[in-house]
Image: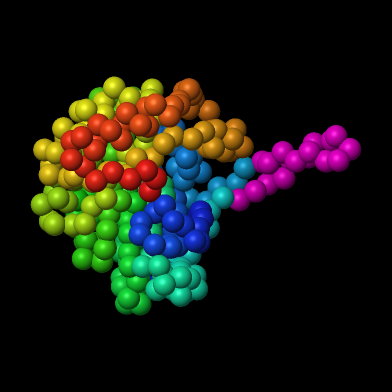
C-alpha cells in the first residue's frame, strides 16, 4: 500500500473547493514563494525543530517539536471518511493540497483512487509545477483542480522556479476538458502590476473563472518558529487593490469569487 508524508489534515474546510471539505496537506514543494503560507511544507520529509517555551517564572526552555508524519493511503482514507456525512450534506469532499501534492505522485494517485472507490468528490490544489505524466495519470480521479497562478514576470525571482512548465501544463489541462478553478493570491507588491496581463493569459487559454485570495501575513510567525531564513519581503493587499482586481476581472467577463 502506497505511503506518503503529510503535515496536516484540516477538517471542515470551506475554502478548498465546493462544500465542506477535509483538506490533506502534503509535504514537499519545489517552489519557495516568498509569501508562502505553509513554509513547513517545503521539507520532503518530517523534521524536528527546537521550540522556545516561556515559563511563568520568566525562564525559557527549548523543546523538540516534530512536523509531518508518514501515513498510508488506506489509513488516510479512514480519517477522511469520518467526515463523510458533512460531505454528503454540503456537496463537499476531499482536497489534496500542500506543499505540492504532485511531488508525491504515487501516493496522490492511491489517495484519489481510494476516494473514488468510496464515491467521494475530489479536488487537487496545485501550483501546476509537476511532470505532465503525473498530472495526466490522476485526471480521471479528479472532480476539480484548483490551479494557482501567482505571477507572470519575475516568477523565478519570487517563487524559485520558472513558470514555463506551469503555463504549459495549464494549457494542456484546458485541452483535456478538466474542471479547473483558477486561483490568484492578491499581493500588491508581487502581482499588482500584472492583473491585466494575467487576465489576457487566461482569456487566451479560454479560462474565465477566478478565485481571488487576498494576502495575509499569518505565515510570518511560522518562518520565525521554524528558523526559516532568507525569505524576506514586505507584502500587502489593500482594500482598494482587492476592489480594483475584482472590477478588472468582472469587466473582462470572468466569474469572480473572493476566497478559495
Left or right, 121 with respect to 45, comes to left
Tell me which residue sits at (55%, 33%) in the image.
Answer: 220
Q: Main secondary structure of the magenta part?
A: strand
Residue 58 included in the magenta stretch of the image: yes
Dividing the picture into quarters, in which one does residue 244 lie? top left
Q: Report x, y in % for residue 82.
A: 50, 73
> Is residue 40 visible in this depiction of the protein?
yes
- Above/below status of 39 relative to 231: below
The residue depicted at 50 percent of the width and 58 percent of the height is 10
Judging depth in this view, the residue of 134 and 170 nearest the camera is 170
Residue 177: where, in percent of width, then height? 13, 57
- Residue 194 lies in magenta, yes or no? no
Outermost right residue: 57
Closer to us: 112 or 68: 112
Instruction: Please state if 108 lies on the left or on the right of 232 as rendered.
Output: left
Is residue 168 among the parts visible in the rendering?
no
> Eyeballing the image, is 229 above or below 141?
above
The image quadrant of residue 165 is: top left
| In front of the other: 29 or 199 | 199
Q: Position of residue 110 (x, y in %)?
A: 33, 67
Q: Quadrant of residue 52?
A: top right
Q: Residue 20, position in %: x, y?
A: 43, 63
Task: Give the residue drawn at x 18%, y 57%.
Answer: 178
Taking the spot 31% from the left edge, 73% from the top edge, the residue there is: 116
Q: Which residues are magenta?
A: 50-66
Amino acid at each position: 500500500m502506497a505511503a506518503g508524508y503529510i503535515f496536516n489534515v484540516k477538517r471542515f474546510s470551506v475554502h478548498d473547493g465546493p462544500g465542506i471539505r477535509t483538506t490533506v496537506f502534503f509535504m514537499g514543494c519545489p517552489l519557495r514563494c516568498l509569501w508562502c503560507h505553509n513554509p513547513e511544507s517545503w521539507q520532503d520529509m518530517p523534521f524536528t525543530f527546537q521550540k522556545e517555551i516561556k515559563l511563568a517564572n520568566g525562564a525559557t526552555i527549548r523543546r523538540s517539536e516534530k512536523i509531518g508524519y508518514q501515513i498510508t493511503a488506506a489509513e488516510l482514507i479512514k480519517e477522511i471518511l469520518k467526515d463523510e456525512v458533512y460531505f454528503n450534506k454540503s456537496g463537499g469532499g476531499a482536497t489534496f493540497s500542500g506543499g505540492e501534492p504532485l511531488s508525491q505522485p504515487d501516493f496522490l494517485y492511491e489517495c484519489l483512487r481510494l476516494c473514488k472507490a468510496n464515491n467521494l468528490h475530489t479536488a487537487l490544489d496545485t501550483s501546476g509545477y509537476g511532470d505532465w505524466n503525473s498530472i495526466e495519470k490522476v485526471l480521471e480521479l479528479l472532480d476539480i483542480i484548483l490551479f494557482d497562478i501567482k505571477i507572470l514576470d519575475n516568477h523565478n525571482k519570487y517563487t524559485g522556479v520558472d513558470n514555463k512548465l506551469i503555463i504549459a501544463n495549464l494549457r494542456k489541462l484546458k485541452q483535456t476538458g478538466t474542471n479547473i478553478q483558477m486561483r490568484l493570491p492578491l499581493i500588491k507588491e508581487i502581482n499588482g502590476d500584472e492583473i491585466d496581463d494575467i487576465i489576457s493569459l487566461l482569456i487566451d487559454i479560454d479560462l474565465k473563472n477566478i478565485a481571488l485570495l487576498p494576502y495575509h501575513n499569518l505565515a510570518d510567525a511560522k518562518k520565525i518558529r521554524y528558523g526559516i531564513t532568507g525569505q524576506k519581503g514586505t507584502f500587502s493587499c489593500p482594500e482598494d487593490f482587492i476592489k480594483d482586481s475584482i472590477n478588472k476581472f468582472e469587466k473582462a467577463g470572468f466569474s469572480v469569487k473572493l476566497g478559495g
